[in-house]
């Protein structure tokens, strides 16, 4: 009788363990952004749309409550000149020059400017001219000298307000997939764009100001 009870208990334990492992594997493979996301105090999904563009920061906070984070994106302007257009490109997601193949075989000039058109940095490869030849020039001087660039990144400085974040504690899914809800405001504190998407992992930003 005792052996039957032990065998029965062991069988129950095995079934429970199997179901737990199966559930864990499911959660790891199927992240649930709705489960993992927490929103600002007054957040309303129906109001988070393109109609927010043009509203001021204080109006946005009145609608959704204070954002979890605020962070600033600096002004970025990069010009690329190259004879190897399939090898040297500007990565507009990471704001930098990127190479498909060997960088050393690529001819390029890359110029970085501040918000008033002064050169901050120069990268040159494959040409006889040097970085120092350009450091005292301005953007208009470069275009006059070299012509229109083969590629350009131009991003005004702005600030990002984050109205969602990853919930504390255990997430449903290995990467903690969440619903990103952010609003980009310009230097006048007016909304110019909204970001509404699903993202893997936490919201990552440098020098975030937490409210």
Image (cartoon, helix red, strand yellow):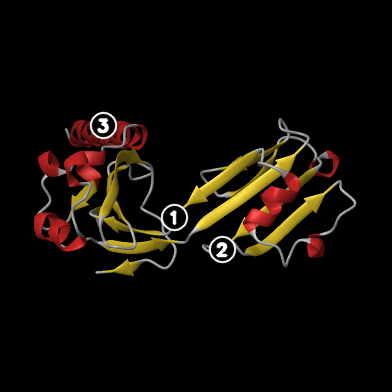
Q: Which residue is mark 3?
A: 19
Q: Is residue 121 left or right of residue 11?
A: right
Whichever of callouts 1 and 3 sits on the residue coming sooner in the sequence is 3
Whichever of callouts 2 and 1 sits on the residue coming sooner in the sequence is 2
Residue 49 visible, this orientation: no
Tell me the quarter of the picture where residue 105 sits.
top right
Residue that appears at 62% across and 40% down: 151
Q: Is residue 59 left or right of residue 112?
A: left
Total marks in image:
3
Residue that appears at 62% across and 64% down: 118
Q: Quadrant of the N terminus?
A: top left
Q: Quadrant of the C terminus?
A: bottom left
Secondary element type, mark 1: loop
Residue 139 visible, this orientation: yes
Distance from Cα at disc 2 to Cα at disc 3: 58 Å
Secondary element type, mark 3: helix
View extreme (front): residue: 144
- Within 10 Å of disc 3 (Cα), the crowding (few <14, some 14-19, many 20+) is few
Distance from Cα at disc 1 to Cα at disc 3: 52 Å
Secondary element type, mark 2: loop
Whichever of callouts 2 and 3 sits on the residue coming sooner in the sequence is 3
- Within 10 Å of disc 1 (Cα), the crowding (few <14, some 14-19, many 20+) is few
The correct choice, above or below, for 61 with respect to 144 in the image is below
Residue 197 placed where, x, y %? 31, 38
Distance from Cα at disc 2 to Cα at disc 1: 10 Å
Of 32 and 203, the residue lying toward us: 203
Residue 160 placed where, x, y %? 33, 57
Residue 30 placed where, x, y %? 32, 32
Q: Which residue is mark 2?
A: 114
Q: Which residue is mark 1?
A: 156
């Amino acid at each position: 009788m005792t052996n039957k009870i032990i065998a029965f208990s062991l069988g129950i334990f095995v079934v429970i363990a199997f179901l737990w492992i199966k559930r864990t594997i499911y959660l790891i493979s199927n992240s649930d952004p709705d489960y993992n996301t927490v929103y600002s105090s007054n957040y309303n999904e129906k109001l988070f749309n393109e109609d927010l563009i043009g509203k001021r920061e204080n109006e946005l906070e009145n609608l959704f409550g204070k954002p979890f984070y605020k962070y600033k994106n600096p002004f970025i302007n990069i010009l690329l000149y190259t004879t190897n257009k399939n090898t040297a490109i500007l990565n507009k997601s990471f704001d930098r020059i990127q190479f498909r193949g060997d960088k050393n075989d690529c001819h390029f000039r890359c110029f970085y400017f501040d918000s008033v058109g002064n050169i901050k940095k120069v990268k040159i490869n494959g040409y006889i001219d040097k970085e120092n030849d350009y450091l005292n020039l301005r953007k208009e001087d470069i275009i006059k000298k070299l012509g229109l660039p083969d590629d350009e990144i131009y991003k005004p400085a702005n600030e990002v307000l984050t109205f969602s974040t990853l919930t504390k504690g255990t997430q449903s899914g290995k990467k903690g997939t969440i619903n990103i809800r952010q609003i980009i405001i310009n230097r006048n504190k007016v909304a110019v764009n909204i970001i509404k998407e699903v993202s893997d992992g936490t919201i990552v930003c440098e020098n975030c100001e937490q409210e």
